[in-house]
């Protein structure tokens, strides 16, 4: 599910209790189909979904299974995978209200399977077909036991967004648009009872604003996306944007810039 253009991360980077546990059982990219609302053509229909689940366990929980070599002493990822698959396939038409509804259902099922051994559960839902010019869209939430998912912050990522733009200082670069590959990571406050943010709409507005402008530097280009993303909603707390120019250097895959800012950096200025 990762992209070369995505900001650096690791499995535990969004775990709540990463300091208090050492053991993780995970499922990476369980591939299913689900009706989760409008797709990239604004049609409500089945679309592909990749579900990743990271069960962050109490400290040294897996020592017993490592010693006994018995699967029953661990959290059985095969049973978890089957339970999540059945959960989705048994829904009428495999339909969920929205991506938060799906995350909540998967999180609850994971806690039910894993039991009291869990420190927290991190669920990442990736929709490869949600945003037309992007490689994928994903929402990631780490949840503590007995806490509602809607009360937890979330990480939202748009990867490999292709933007044609006039950018550069050389004469040819001021004439022809070139392809810039962008990844945007939003860190969102807990939504509570509020409706999910319209990220396809946010990305569409940002794309239209960027494509109608021109820039001399990648730094200015990235900062304008960061600014627009931070100000898109008061629920967005932090934004990281990484952009790469694949055609900038003849002997390198790409050159790029990454910037992270808080919403407060623009609201208070």
Image (cartoon, rainbow, N blue to C red):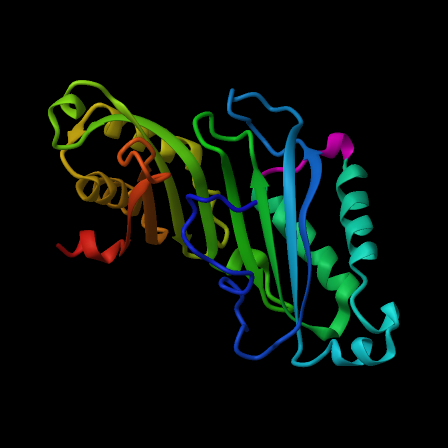
Which quarter of the rendering shows the N terminus? top right
Can see residue 198? no
Instruction: Give the residue drawn at x 27%, y 25%.
Output: 178
If the image is split into quadrants, where does the C terminus sit? Answer: bottom left
**Is 17 part of what is drawn in magenta?**
no
Please identify the quarter of the rendering in which residue 221 is found. Answer: top left
Question: Could one spot residue 90 in this view of the protein?
Answer: yes
Q: How many numbered discs?
A: 0
Left or right for 267, reference 45: left
The part of the image, by quadrant, that contains residue 163 is: top left
- Residue occupying the point 26% across, 34% down: 248
Q: At 38% across and 44% down in the image, what residue appears?
A: 184
| x and y, in percent, of residue 38 in the image | 55, 27
Q: Which residue is pictured at 49% across the width and 63% down the height?
A: 13
State the extent of the magenta-drawn residues as a range: 92-98
Which one is in front, 257 or 250? 250
Percent across and percent down for residue 139 are: 52, 47
Q: Is residue 49 above or below residue 9?
A: above
Whether residue 225 sits left or right of residue 75 in the image: it is: left
Where residue 5 appears, x then y in whole percent? 41, 43
The residue most toward the front is 251
Q: Position of residue 60 (x, y in %)?
A: 69, 81
- The image shows residue 174, relative to residue 87, as above or below, that is above
User: Which of the 4 quarters of the picture holds residue 127?
Assistant: top right
Q: Nearer the viewer, residue 17 or 31?
A: 31
Left or right: 132 as drawn, with respect to 25: left
């Amino acid at each position: 599910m990762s992209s070369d253009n995505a900001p650096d991360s690791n499995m535990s980077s969004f775990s709540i209790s990463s300091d208090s546990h050492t053991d993780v059982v995970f499922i990476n990219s369980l591939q299913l189909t689900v009706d989760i609302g409008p797709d990239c053509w604004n049609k409500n229909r089945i679309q592909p979904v990749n579900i990743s689940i990271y069960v962050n366990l109490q400290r040294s929980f897996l020592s017993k299974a490592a010693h006994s070599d018995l699967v029953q002493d661990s959290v059985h990822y095969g049973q978890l995978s089957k339970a999540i698959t059945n959960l989705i396939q048994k829904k009428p038409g495999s339909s969920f209200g929205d991506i938060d509804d799906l995350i909540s259902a998967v999180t609850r099922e994971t806690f039910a399977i894993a039991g009291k051994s869990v420190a927290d559960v991190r669920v990442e839902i990736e929709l490869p077909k949600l945003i037309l010019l992007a490689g994928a869209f994903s929402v990631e939430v780490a949840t503590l036991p007995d806490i509602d998912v809607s009360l937890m912050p979330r990480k939202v990522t748009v990867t490999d967004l292709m933007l044609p733009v006039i950018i550069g200082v050389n004469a040819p670069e001021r004439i022809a648009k070139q392809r810039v590959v962008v990844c945007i990571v939003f860190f969102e406050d807990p939504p509570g009872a509020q409706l999910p943010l319209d990220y396809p709409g946010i990305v569409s507005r940002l794309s239209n604003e960027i494509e109608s402008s021109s820039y001399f530097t990648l730094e200015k280009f990235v900062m304008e996306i960061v600014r627009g993303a931070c100000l898109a909603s008061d629920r967005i707390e932090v934004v990281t944007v990484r952009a790469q120019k694949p055609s900038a250097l003849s002997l390198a895959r790409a050159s790029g810039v990454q910037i992270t800012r808080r919403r407060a950096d623009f609201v208070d200025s």
